[in-house]
Image (cartoon, grey):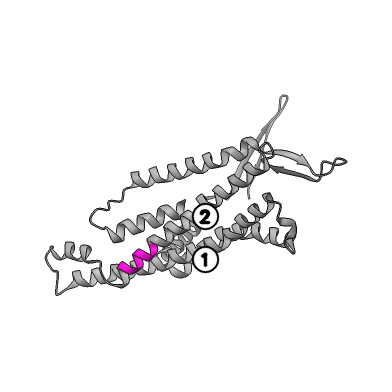
Amino acid sequence: MTLCAISVERWYAICHPLRFHSTVRRARYIIVIIWVASACIAIPELITSTVIPLRPDTVLLSACYPALWGDEIIVIFQICLMVGLYFLPIAMMAFSYIHIALVLWRGSISETIELRARKPMIAGGIRVHENIGQIESRKKAVRMLVAVVVVFALCFLPNHTLNILRYTGQLQTVPNKRVFALFAHWATFFNSCINPVIYNFMSESFRKAFKDVLVRSCCRKTQRLRQRPSSYHMSFTGSRSRFSNNITL
């Protein structure tokens, strides 16, 4: 959902720049909607899931899944999840980025250039160079986001496939099913791990901001170490006798 929201925002900003107005308030609304929708999607499984022991002689081998539903309902729910949270978002992101690519690489971003051309030219065409630089930066941003979407599609497909095979009873026919299950779960975590790496290699602004954060963090730690007191004074008081002990470190 987050990747979808980003793709729609990019599409609206690049393909319809005159009508696009991005604000912090709007971004907050989008984030809240994404989190609320995600929580609502998870509620059915939360309510219907229960622990089922796989062997009657031990509780160590147990499974937790929405067993309160019937098998057919579980399969339908998983298919709906796969369509709603995988295929539809990928289709929406593919449409957005393909349209963005056509607009940028054909140089048909005339609305933005015409809008800025109405303003007076500055020092022999600096305004035109700014427009060209903005288009190039947008192209780089689109390349990066396309890479993020492709990685997302590759990493989440095994997990959705695993759920469909598991609840349809076809997982037993898969060769090396244990390795496949481990890889499917690992790939979803790998997606979150690889995204910052993609940003770092493909976004110059991300690299600069990341270095800035590291430098500020190191400077703050150094300041805190310098501000620590180098000596301590400790006093001990008893009920019958009073004494003090000075300790200098």
Q: Residues within 10 Å of mark 2 (few under 14, many from 20)?
A: some
Residue located beneath label 1 in the image:
197
Task: Tell me if residue 229 can be seen.
Answer: no
Residue located beneath label 2 in the image:
86
The amino acid at mark 1 is: Val
Q: Residues within 10 Å of mark 1 (few under 14, many from 20)?
A: few
Give the residues drawn in magenta, as a range.
97-103
Q: What residue is rendered at 27% in x and 51% in y? A: 21
Residue positioned most to the right: 57
Numbered label attached to residue 162? none
For residue 56, what is the image quadrant?
Answer: top right
- x, y percentage for residue 69? 66, 38
Q: Count the numbered circles shown.
A: 2
Residue positioned most to the bottom: 124
Q: What residue is rendered at 47% in x and 54% in y? A: 88
Relative to 234, 110 lies left or right: left
- x, y percentage for residue 136? 32, 71
N-term mark: 1 or 2: 2
Residue depth check, mark 1 versus mark 2: number of the one nearer the observer? 2
